[in-house]
Structures are given as structure tokens and as C-alpha cells.
Amino acid sequence: MAQLVLLPGKDRSLARRHPWIFAGIVDRLNGRARPGDTVDVVAANGRPLARAAWSPESKIRARVWTFDPDEIIDDVFFKRHVHAAVARRQAMPDLRGQDGLRLIHGESDGLPGLIVDRYGDTLVVQLTATGPEKWRRAILAALREASGCARIYERSDSDVRRLEGLEPVTGWVFGEAPAEPLVIVENGVRIGVDVVAGHKTGFYLDQRDNRLLTRELAGGRTVLNCFCYTGGFSLQALAGGATSVLSIDSSGPALSTAVDNLARNPELAADRAEWRQADVFSELRVLKSAGHRFDLIILDPPKFAPSAQHAERAARAYRDINVCAFRLLNPGGLLMTYSCSGGIRSEHFQQIVTDAAIDAGQQTRLLHRLAAPADHPVALNFSEGEYLKGLLCQVD
Ligand code: SAH
């Protein structure tokens, strides 16, 4: 096995069990390794530290499989980790029985570069790094066995794959495309999931609990749902008895799925829903100048800062939409605001929202901090895993 030697004094992040080995701390590779091969990671003095997947083209030069330098990385390793991830979810009462569930959440499930979402009996797999790419056969076999699924679709088309020097790969890798559109039930609401053309693996499972909270808060309120995608928050707001729900997104296909989703739930009051294709940044201003006000506003924008180097520009964008939203609230109104940017830490996000409330001239209090549910765990040695953070705020 080739040996990846770190620079002197550069083993601190590994000692703290951070799974990413950046190019800047690597001295050299002794021996030969192809992308995805397992390499022994050693300190400058030769002390063994870990075993990792080699990724010569990425700034993250290797991702750690194990901090036990003697552990064997083979099919059994993947089988064990996949089974453990599935069992962890089965052990959580709020996850049991969910139709849509993240089964494997990369680094935080001990499998860097691997994302797996389950929609009913369909799995969607995303291999985002050279390590999982090399072990794809073992991973797919373990997933079939551990999940009992009927079919697996591969959605290895995320941008990060390019940084690893990998081509996009998509298609059915086990079983066949289902005859009917895929529909999951999330907390009583039916939602169509397009695993082939939808965002990410088809749906934003990480907002499941927060959509449920919206349902609990929406009764008797007028609701504005910004960045609504296929309408997850909107449908829960209707289910919770919102008096009106205006939903905005810039994507035509997302909105057309949202309209279909509403039709899939005939018990909801469709006449209370309005869908608008627009840019949220400008539409919030249009609503303000037309004198509209709302009792509950949801802001769930896309990742403005994929990494820390985009943080400053992203902060301005977050501040802008949050100022606009605060100005659109009725007295006593609620703002549910999110950032899913890995490059913005939760304290920073809270500061941005604080500044926005001050700019808007609103006396505001924080009622709840919000995050992703337990099927998106955060390994404590991997703070990047805490990408989704939300604040529920109320104005006077
Ligand atoms: N809240 C959604 C997920 C939102 S994902 C859910 O619960 O499922 C972010 C959404 O923002 C995407 O649907 C994307 O199409 C939309 N979007 C991105 N930029 C936008 C903009 N400037 N204005 C309006 N929508 C935008």
C-alpha cells in the first residue's frame, strides 16, 4: 500500500479525527496509488495515523476511512458501515416509518463522499469522491442487502465530483425505473419526487422536521414561502390551517411539481394557495411596495456560500432577503429563516439575521434554533456536517 506522508507538525487535524487531508499538509506519496486507492497516512516521523482514499486531483487529497491504522478496508468494511447507518436510523423513533429518509450522510456516517437517500423502496445514491467511486460495487451490494430496496438510481452529478476529476454518472444501477411517478408521504402530505431531474437526489429531506413545525405554526396565519421548490413547506402550512399561502420560486419545473403535489393532496384547501415564478430578491420588494404583509414567512434559499471563501458575498445576500422579510411581517409575525451554506457558521448566520432585524427596525426575539433531523447526523469531529441552520424569530 502506498504511504501518504504528512508535513512535519501537520498532524493536528488528524489527531482531532477530522477526515479531510488537504493538499497543504501533504509532503509526499511514497509508492504508487490510483484515484480511490487506500493509502496509509503517516506523520512526518513515520508514525501511522489512518487509512484514507487517495484523490490526487482534489484539494482534499485524501479522505479518511479509519483512524485505526491497522483496519482493513475491504467489502466487509463497507457492509458493516452501511448496515450500521441503516440500523442507527431504525433506532430513532422519529425516523422509523418515514417514507423519505437519508440513509447515509457521508462523513458523519463514516463514509466520506457517499450520500444515499431512500424514497419508499427506491434508493438514490450519490458518489461524490474517488473513494466511494472505487468501492461502488461493494457499496451497492451492501445497500441492496441492508435496505431491501427494489431499485437504485445513481445521481452522481454534483459539482463536487468534478473537483475530484470524476465524470458525472447517472442512471438506474439496480432494478428498473418505476412505472408510476415516485410519491412519498411526509408527515401526512403526499409529495412527488423526481429522482432523475429534481434537485440533489430529488427532494430536500433535511427540512422534514422544520416543515412539520411550519404545519404546527401555520393555523390561522397568512404565509409567504420563499424558495418553495416543490412546495414542501407550503403544503404543510395548508395542512396546518394557514388562511393563505403564497409560494415563490424561480424554477418553472419545481413550481409545476408543486402544483401537481397540491393536486395529490385533495384534502388541502387548494384555493388558499398561490404559486409565483419569480426572483425572491426582487419579488420581496414588489410585495412590500404593493403593501402586502404576512404572519409567517419562510426563507429557505439555496447555498449562497458553498465554502468559506464565498462567505462575505453570501452574507450580503442573506442579509438582504432577511431585511426584506422582516419588513413584510405583521406585528407578532414569525420569520423562519435558513442557511444551508457550509461556508457560514451558525454564529455568523445569527449575526446576519440580527443585523437584518436591526436594519428593518424590528424588535425581534429568537424562539427556536432549527437544524436537520437525525437522519442527517453531524459527526462532532466534522463541523462542516452542520450545514443546515435555521432560526425561528418573532417580531413585536
Ligand atoms: N424549501 C424547499 C427547498 C428549497 S431549495 C423545500 O422544502 O423543499 C432552494 C430553491 O430556491 C430551489 O427550488 C431554487 O429553484 C430556488 N431559487 C434559487 N435562487 C432563487 C431566486 N433568486 N429566487 C427564487 N427562487 C430561487
Image (tube, rainbow, N blue to C red):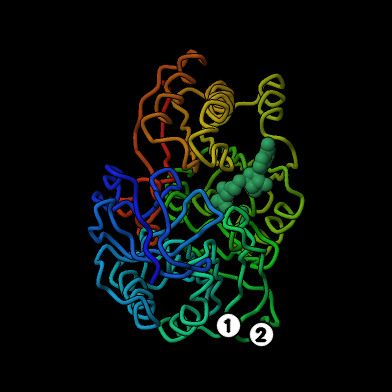
The residue at the point 34 percent across, 74 percent down is 81
Residue 61 percent coordinates (x, y): 46, 54
Q: Is residue 24 visible?
A: yes
Above or below, comparing residue 79 to residue 381 in the picture: below
SS of the residue under disc 2: loop
The image quarter in which residue 200 lies: bottom right
Residue under label 1, please give it.
Answer: 151
What amino acid is at disc 2? Glu
Q: Is residue 238 visible?
A: no
Q: Earlier in the sequence, mark 2 or mark 1?
A: 1
What amino acid is at disc 1? Arg
Q: Is residue 38 left or right of residue 253?
A: left
The residue at the point 67 percent across, 70 percent down is 170
SS of the residue under disc 1: strand
Residue under label 2, please give it.
Answer: 176
For the residues labelled 2 and 1, say whether their Cβ atoms are less than 8 Å apart: yes
The residue at the point 70 percent across, 53 percent down is 254
Q: Quadrant of ligand 1?
A: top right
